[in-house]
Image: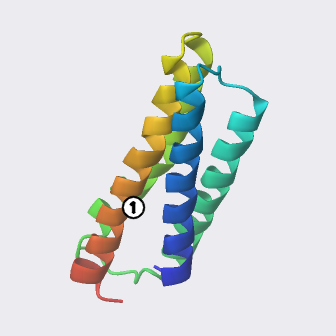
């Protein structure tokens, strides 16, 4: 993993969560600007995936399956939460999307741990 990209994704996920939790407190509904925030996070996550595919060595084992399963899950969580939040018209719809940013940050922290301790690139 490229350290600055990992930190940028973490910062984007946490900033998105903070912004969405504020909107949850204000009883806002999921709107276009929220979709744009999730899209920025998704682009960063997809860039992380592309970089990871490019720099992970080709031999089997060493935690690569676990690494990529966490990374793909981190990519899917905000999309699923955004879909869920858009169909839930209560104040907790946006709260679901806000929580997905925290989940994404936790998953990426685990991805980073696997990278540092098992893959050894």
Q: Nearer the viewer, residue 12 or 118?
A: 12
Which residue is at 43% across, 37% downward?
A: 99
Q: Nearer the viewer, residue 109 or 74?
A: 109
Quadrant of image for the C terminus: bottom left
Query: Where 50 falls versus 81 (above or below)?
Result: below
Instruction: Name the outermost residue toward the right.
Output: 32
Q: As drawn, is 14 to the left or to the right of 109?
A: right
Give whichever of 50, 86 is nearer the camera.
86
**Please, is residue 47 above or below residue 94 in the view?**
below
Label 1 neighbour load within 10 Å: few <14, some 14-19, many 20+: many
Left or right placement of residue 56 versus residue 116 in this view: right
Residue positioned 56% across, 36% down in the render: 22
Report x, y in % for residue 63.
24, 70
Report which quarter residue 36 is drawn in. top right
Q: Is residue 36 visible?
A: yes
Please tell me which residue is depicted at 54% across the width and 16% down the height of the picture. Answer: 91
Q: Position of residue 72 (x, y in %)?
A: 44, 52
Farthest-out residue, top = 89
Residue pointed to by mark 1? 108
Q: Is residue 45 left or right of residue 100?
A: right
Q: Quadrant of residue 70?
A: bottom left
Q: Is residue 80 visible?
A: no
Mark 1: secondary structure: helix
């Amino acid at each position: 993993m490229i350290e600055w990209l990992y930190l940028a994704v973490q910062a984007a996920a946490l900033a998105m969560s903070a912004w969405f939790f504020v909107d949850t407190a204000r009883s806002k509904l999921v709107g276009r600007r929220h979709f744009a925030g999730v899209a920025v996070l998704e682009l960063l996550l997809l860039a992380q995936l592309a970089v990871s595919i490019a720099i992970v060595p080709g031999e089997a084992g060493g935690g690569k399956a676990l690494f990529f399963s966490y990374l793909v899950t981190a990519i899917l969580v905000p999309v699923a939460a955004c879909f869920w939040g858009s169909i839930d018209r209560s104040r907790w719809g946006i709260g679901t999307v806000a929580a997905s940013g925290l989940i994404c940050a936790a998953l990426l922290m685990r991805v980073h741990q696997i990278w540092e301790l098992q893959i050894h690139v």
